[in-house]
Image: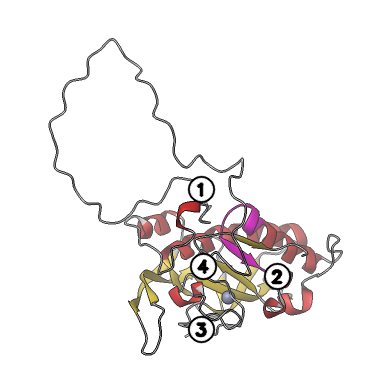
């Protein structure tokens, strides 16, 4: 289906990438303390005992709108397809995403130790930024939500830098069932369609911004609009917690020609000089 370029992010925290520091001051507290009762003088009526009902699917933790990065330190060691969420397709519609249901059944290929596929996958047809893709991405439902957030950042930065919106994103691949080329034994989020590689942005004006050609690898803020655009969209995608991993040419040579965006269970910021 998609083409996976080497070196994309893995779903294991130990090793060459390592988890990002968590506990950001703008992040919601993971567990809110219960609030004291507002009416202590009134005795609450006894509640009838209810049968416990298993939820259909886990509930996504509450967090800032548009932020889908996984900042939970307790699941960093979990390796496997991402969870499905009962509300995900409703959330997609609310986010203005046109999509089609898709299927990538979870399976373990012959002679492989890793599972591939995911329980909740969609074809991302069109998002709130009205950006077309060269190939409609097949991604997990939560990745589709994150792509909707990403589109808003892309369009804001395109209008600011070029006074023209982005009409098309050229992606290089989403789903690819395999271990990471550079780190054998590590499982790429591409194995779950929980990642996307992006090579270029095509503006409505006709101008093309390519990661390979236009990404500014200098320490200083980029001087050219195309470099400034690529720096801004990648850093905002990381800093606004849209994705767990945002890897750019700053990260390593394997990403010299694309951005890798994924929803791993741990964080990595590959948007800054190393
Ligand atoms: Zn990738």
Decide: few, some or many residues near mark 4? Use Cα within 10 Å; few <14, some 14-19, many ≥20: many
Marks 1 and 2 sit apart, C-alpha to C-alpha, by 27 Å
The answer to whether mark 4 is within 8 Å of ligand 1 is no
Question: Is residue 210 shown to the viewer in this render?
Answer: no
Residue named by callout 2: 251
The answer to if 247 sits in the magenta stretch is: yes
Mark 4 or mark 3, which has the lower sequence index?
3
Q: Nearer the viewer, residue 124 or 212?
A: 212
Residue found farthest to the bottom: 111
Decide: few, some or many residues near mark 1? Use Cα within 10 Å; few <14, some 14-19, many ≥20: few
Marks 3 and 1 sit apart, C-alpha to C-alpha, by 29 Å
Q: Nearer the viewer, residue 100 or 240?
A: 240
Mark 2 or mark 4, which has the lower sequence index?
4
Decide: few, some or many residues near mark 3? Use Cα within 10 Å; few <14, some 14-19, many ≥20: some
Marks 3 and 2 sit apart, C-alpha to C-alpha, by 22 Å
Indicate whether 222 appears above or below 103.
above
Marks 1 and 4 sit apart, C-alpha to C-alpha, by 26 Å
In the image, residue 61 lies at what x, y percent? 42, 48
Q: Which residues are magenta?
A: 236-249
In the image, residue 4 lies at what x, y percent? 56, 82
Q: Quadrant of ligand 1?
A: bottom right
Residue 244: image quadrant is: bottom right
Residue at the image point whose x is 52% and y is 71% from the top: 195
Q: Which mark is residue 235?
A: none
Quarter of the image with the C terminus in it: bottom right
For discs 4 and 3, the disc positioned in front in the rendered view: 4
Q: Nearer the viewer, residue 264 or 174?
A: 264
Q: Which mark is residue 2?
A: 3
- Image position of 220 (left or right of 262): right
Residue named by callout 4: 12
Task: Tell me the SS state at disc 3.
Answer: loop
Q: Which mark is residue 65?
A: 1
């Amino acid at each position: 289906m998609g083409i996976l370029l080497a070196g994309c992010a893995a779903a294991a925290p130990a090793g060459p990438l390592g988890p990002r520091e968590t506990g950001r001051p703008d992040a919601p507290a993971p567990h809110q303390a219960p609030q004291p009762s507002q009416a202590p003088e009134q005795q609450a009526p006894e509640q009838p005992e209810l049968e416990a009902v298993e939820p259909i699917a886990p509930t996504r933790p509450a967090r800032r709108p548009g932020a889908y990065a996984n900042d939970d330190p307790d699941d960093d060691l979990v390796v496997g397809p991402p969870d499905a969420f009962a509300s995900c397709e409703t959330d997609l519609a609310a986010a203005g995403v046109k999509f089609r249901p898709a299927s990538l059944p979870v399976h373990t290929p012959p002679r492989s130790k890793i599972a591939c596929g995911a329980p909740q996958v969609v074809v991302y047809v069109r998002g709130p930024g009205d950006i077309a893709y060269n190939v409609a991405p097949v991604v997990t439902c939560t990745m589709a939500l994150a792509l909707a957030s990403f589109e808003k950042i892309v369009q804001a930065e395109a209008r600011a830098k070029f006074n023209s919106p982005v009409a098309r994103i050229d992606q290089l691949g989403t789903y690819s069932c395999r271990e990471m080329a550079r780190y054998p034994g590590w499982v790429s989020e591409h194995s779950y369609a929980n990642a996307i590689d992006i090579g270029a942005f095509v503006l409505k004006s006709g101008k093309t911004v390519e990661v390979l050609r236009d990404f500014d690898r200098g320490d200083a803020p980029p001087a050219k609009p195309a470099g400034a655009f690529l720096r801004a969209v990648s850093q905002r995608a990381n800093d606004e917690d849209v994705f767990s991993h945002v890897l750019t040419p700053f990260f390593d040579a394997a990403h010299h020609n694309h951005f890798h965006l994924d929803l791993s269970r741990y964080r990595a910021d590959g948007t800054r000089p190393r």
